[in-house]
Image (cartoon, rainbow, N blue to C red):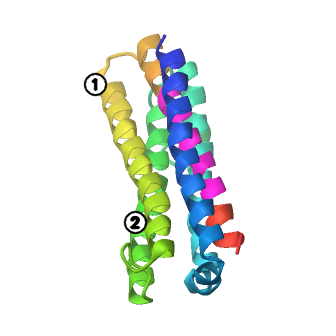
Amino acid sequence: MVSVGTVVWLASELMFFAALFAMYFTLRAASPEMWATETEKLNVPFALINTIILVSSSFSCQLGVFRAEDLKPRRTGGLFNLKEWGMVEWFVLTFILGAIFVSVQAYEYTELIAHGIALNSNAYGSVFYMTTGFHGLHVAGGLIAFLLIIGRALIARKLGHYEATGAIVVSYYWHFVDVVWIALFAIIYFLK
């Protein structure tokens, strides 16, 4: 039931982001000259590195899910023996990568504000910060979910199917957030 409920909820989130994409394309069609000048201020290589960080977190998340499915909560070997990592270690790595993504995005915001792109500067600034900002809030929500799953795994004496299901549905959400970012990144940073 939890998995089905999560998928239904993610479908509603998909509609939310579809509305943001529709807003982006509508404003872009109404002011193409603004998009031509404002997109030149974006630091594409910087955003690409940040995208790679976020996408790599999907891989570490999935490795954590595999360990959760094996009911292996924590590592059984040394810290640098990745083959022996459990769900907790992979989810901690995922959390770190996600936190780096959000931090770099916040830094990018400060750089763009210094270049005159603010939420209230024009239509481009508004749509840029709304789309990427709502995505950033979703990433932050995913980070909180990872902390809850990690905490539950550390408190539980033994990782059972209940805890594994929680880890799996958090991964659904995380993969969704990553796929949405890939679409946002492609549209905002490459479609000029």
* Label 1 residue SS: helix
Q: Nearer the viewer, mark 2 or mark 1?
A: 2
Q: Which residue is mark 1?
A: 155
Residue pictured at 61% horizontal, 78% vertical: 35
Q: Nearer the viewer, residue 189 or 66?
A: 189
Name the kind of residue labelled 1 in the image.
Answer: Ile
Magenta-colored stretch includes residue 180: yes
- Report x, y in % for residue 137: 39, 51
Q: Amino acid at mark 2?
A: Ser
Q: What residue appears at the point 43 percent right and 35 percent down from the top-left corner?
A: 88
What label sits on residue 103 in the rendered view? 2
Q: Residue furthest right?
A: 191
Q: Is residue 79 above or below residue 35?
A: above
Q: What range is drawn magenta here?
A: 168-184
By secondary structure, the bulk of the magenta-drawn segment is best described as helix
Mark 2 secondary-structure assignment: helix
Asked if the residue under mark 1 is in contact with the one under mark 2, i.e. CB atoms within 8 Å, the reply is no
Neighbor class of circle 1 (other Cα within 10 Å; few <14, some 14-19, many 20+) is few
Q: Tell me: residue 37, above or below residue 145.
A: below
Residue 168 place in picture, x, y as percent: 52, 25
Looking at the rendering, in which quadrant would you find the C terminus? Answer: bottom right
Relative to 152, is 45 on the left or the right?
A: right
Residue 98's place in the image compared with 69, above or below, is below
Q: Residues within 10 Å of mark 2 (few under 14, many from 20)?
A: some
